Amino acid sequence: MLYRFFSLLGALFAAAAVTAAPFEWKAETEGSRLTITATVAPQHYFYAGTLEIQVSGADGKTLSPKTAPKPVGHDDEFFGATQIYPAGKHVWLFEGVPPFRATVSYQGCRSANGGEPAMCYMPEDLTLAGGTPPAETLLDQAVDAPLALDRLKTLRQTTGTLSAEGFLRFLDRAEGGAAPEEKPLFHGAGIWWIILLTLLGGLGLNLTPCVLPMIPVNLAIIGADGAGRGTGFRRGLAYGTGMAAAYGILGLAVILTGARFGSLNASSWFNFVIAAVFLILALAMFGVFNVDLSGKLNVKPSRIKGGKTVVAFVMGALAALLAGACVAPVVIGVLLFAAERYQAGNYFALALPFLLGVGMALPWPLAGAGFGVLPKPGAFMVAVKTLFGVIILAAACYYGWTGYTLLPGKFSPEAEAAQLEAGIAEARRSGKPLLIDFWATWCKNCRAMEREVFPQPEVKKALEKFVVVKFQAENLNDPAIRRVLEHWKIPGLPAFVIAEPLP
């Protein structure tokens, strides 16, 4: 019995002595990619069922492999039919934010060969990457100390939606391309030309991704009951007045207080309120009850009374607030120009945001008048109102989901700061310029660029020259997020900054 004990003990020590030779693991980082390679010696293998690879990036996110080798079937002497990784090289590829932290657990075996019996080694736990501080440490550092943004030299920045061609020009100029110099908005323009351009810019805001989906809702409010041309015009005028008033007030807040477009949209309660308003309107369209601001809530299906003009005014103001999530270049241009002129002592500039709202409101009285001549309530109008109800209900679901994603715990400013810090370190190491993409889930223009610009092959190729950091500025009022935005004086989203680390 004692002999068998020492024989077994000797076998275990022998197994431990040769563990490092038959199984070699290596982790290599190149840009945002981590490659993990396992080299298995001849006559050896390890079990797929015991393999566990855990990888996380500097942002604290757990990464799944982009590509992974497939195990093969094996009639094992110990466990019967099982899956293994046989002799040879096996490669796993991960993508994320460096520096990475990677650990691996596995158990390997040796096949019987040349008189040597089959043998299984002890399970192994290895740390492949993690010499740099782990994500938790980076997050703690991001909380305790602000980002050293003064270590960056800004090469170029821009705000607002860009086409694929415009984004490529932006990247090329940052690389030293000879694109023509851009002049500020209203450069050299007279007062009447400035007024005209502002009105046209406001008119164009109706076609932004934030306002365009609201058009069926707006039409439902100002004329879906076929109340007549005069009533439709009055409701459209009220709708436009609310839009102009809210836009003027919102613009004044930006100029006088330094607030940012989209700050309301970044609030969960604001999105929940919008969802509730749309839900009430949808139920009214379905005939559950009618919204009547003349002094009572009538639960019987009947025509909405004159109080709907007030509803139109409120919805116009609401549309202006929702437009804050779409920072079109003309909006930023007008606000920056107005702020500059106001600081220079020209108080007339404070009227420019209001003029922008007037331009946005221009088509709605006419739309209300035209839509107000639809047939009187009947089978046709019931179908129209039901259709509008479905559209408004979909909008309520969208804003409800957006509010849910903005609840505390769904977004970490510390993780974004750690990711930016890691990007700065990678740019310094690689010698590539740093591209910071400021975005948020509530920013519809950000999503439009993700869908239409970034997937373009020429854009993907151009981005290979940069260390790209996607900075999620979800809560514009968070101190950590506000500090980064104020460093580059970013008034809204999307925004892009190209910088390089100083020596």
Image (cartoon, rainbow, N blue to C red):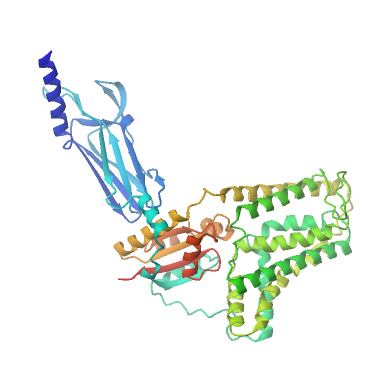
Rendering quarter of residue 352:
bottom right
- The residue that appears at 87% across and 47% down in the rendered structure is 298
Q: Quadrant of residue 261?
A: bottom right
Identify the residue at horizontal 87%, vertical 50% (top origin). 296
Question: Is 118 in front, or is 411?
Answer: 411
Q: Position of residue 15 (x, y in %)?
A: 16, 29
Residue drawn at point x = 89 percent, y = 60 percent: 228
223 horizontally vs 342: left or right: right
* Location of residue 385 with respect to 427 vertically, above or below: above
* Residue 456 seen: no
Residue found at the very far top of the displayed protein: 1
State the image quarter where residue 229 is shown.
bottom right
- Image vertical order of residue 123 relative to residue 480, above or below: above
Residue 485 showing in the rendered view: yes
| Residue 133 point in image, percent of width and height | 31, 52
Total numbered badges shown on the rendered structure: 0
Left/right placement of residue 57 relative to residue 265 reads left
Depicted 195 relative to depicted 216: above or below: below
Question: Where residue 210 sits: x, y (%)?
Answer: 64, 60
Q: Which residue extends farthest front?
A: 144
| Front in this rendered view, residue 425 or 371 | 425
Residue 1, horizontal then vertical, whole percent: 13, 12
Q: Considering the image in quadrants, where does the C terminus appear?
A: bottom left
Residue 356's place in the image compared with 36, above or below, is below
422 relative to 87 in the view: left or right: right
Residue 330 left/right relative to 131: right
Q: Quick one: 319 or 86, which is closer to the camera?
A: 319
